[in-house]
Amino acid sequence: MHINYKLKDKFDIWFFVPIVLLLCFGLIAIYSATLNNPLAENNFIKQLIWVGMGIVVFFVVYFIPTNTFKNLAWPAYILSIVLLFIVVVLGKKVSGAKSWLYFGSLGFQPSELAKISTILALSSFLSRKETNIESFKDILISSAIGFIPIVLILLEPDMGTVLVFLTIFLTIIFWKGISLFGLFIVLSPGIVAISSLFGILPLVATLVIVGIVLILFKKRLIFSSSLFAINLAAGFFTDYVFRALSPHQQIRIKSFLDPMSDPLGSGYNSIQAKVAIGSGGLFGKGFLQGHQTQLNFIPEQWTDFIYCVIGEEFGFIGAVLTLLLFIWLFIKILKVATTTKDEFLSLTIIGILSLFFIHFIINIGMAVGIMPVIGIPLPLVSYGGSSLLVNMLLLGIVANVYRTRKNYT
């Protein structure tokens, strides 16, 4: 009895169960999606190997000393920034984005490493005793930590990953306790930058709104003027960078902002995805019986549109069960974030939760046609080695913090 209690206290089996089930769902769906596609016939075996390696990574991370994460935060962040810079210059283009580095036949996305390192570095900075999230200086430093990788990823360009990083950054500073005005400082330049992509009138209108909000906050004139100048610079700098991009990169960004601008590309995928899910009915067409899946109507459906395979072949029940497994996993991660007493670890876990959640929301949204098609995989389910290993590493961190949660007061 004592041994069972000790094991339960150190390892939450009910956190590991949804992970294993989602991995199994992914393998089943990938097998079905690649069965009749000669170009992807080995993907199931590759994914099976990645799953095995991912479980090993999970337990290796689970057993390492918890303070290792804080010690590695800044070296890992610097390394990821260097790799992101290298991929912008020397990376191989895949689907129009220069986001992969290749070492022989092995491909690697530096942005995956950057997700981990940015969470750790931002959590490390914000958890310092001398950091004041209401200080303009510390807000700028936090923003720099979050936005340096965003700018480099934007140059690839990989708009989906940019959205993931923005969500991570905003969630962590919100968890830290930033005020409404602090949040306005962080968000306003980004909103102005996005508005500039729609033309001069939206840009001017947004700047007017920013000016009115600054007046309502009643801060010092010099401070408000400086903040308005930053917003103004963000608008014009974004427009300059956009015009400097190649026509192909501009088309990708426009497609992200307006999916209907590419009806034969992302629009086609979205239509076929909705047909696949809708045709599944309550119980689905059966394993290996999906028409959209087996006839390969959706390009590379084993990656971004893997949820369509589940929806078509296992129906409403299979689709809902997948959602419930993710919700179960999210609740477990949130519980760890709220129970650990160490601020660095709490911020790190909430950053991990935000990463999984935004991937989940975007991917499912793409599959059911309420989000633009931006190339975001479904964690633990979609095909992909680097993303799976990173996901299992992050979940290993959560399990590690659960193991040592009583060591911090």
Image (cartoon, rainbow, N blue to C red):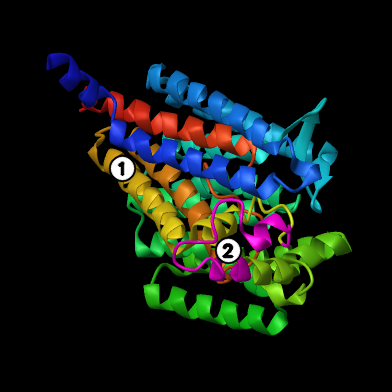
Q: Nearer the viewer, residue 316 or 334?
A: 316
Relative placement, left or right, of 213 versus 54 is: left
Q: Mark 1 = which residue?
A: 332
Q: Secondary structure at mark 2?
A: helix
Residue 137 in magenta stretch: no
Using the rendered view, name the quadrant where residue 260 is placed: bottom right
Q: Nearer the viewer, residue 202 or 58?
A: 58
- The amino acid marked with disc number 1 is Lys
Q: Nearer the viewer, residue 352 or 230?
A: 352
Secondary structure of the magenta portion, mostly? loop
Query: Residue 219, how many percent across, how many down?
Result: 40, 68
The residue sitting at 31% across, 45% down in the picture is 334
The residue sitting at 38% across, 33% down in the picture is 398
The residue sitting at 60% across, 34% down in the picture is 113
- Residue 139 in view in this figure: no
Q: Nearer the viewer, residue 371 or 225?
A: 371
Q: What segment carries the magenta color?
A: 274-297
Q: Mark 2 = which residue?
A: 367
Vertical order, 156 against 389 (above or below): below
Q: Secondary structure at mark 1?
A: helix
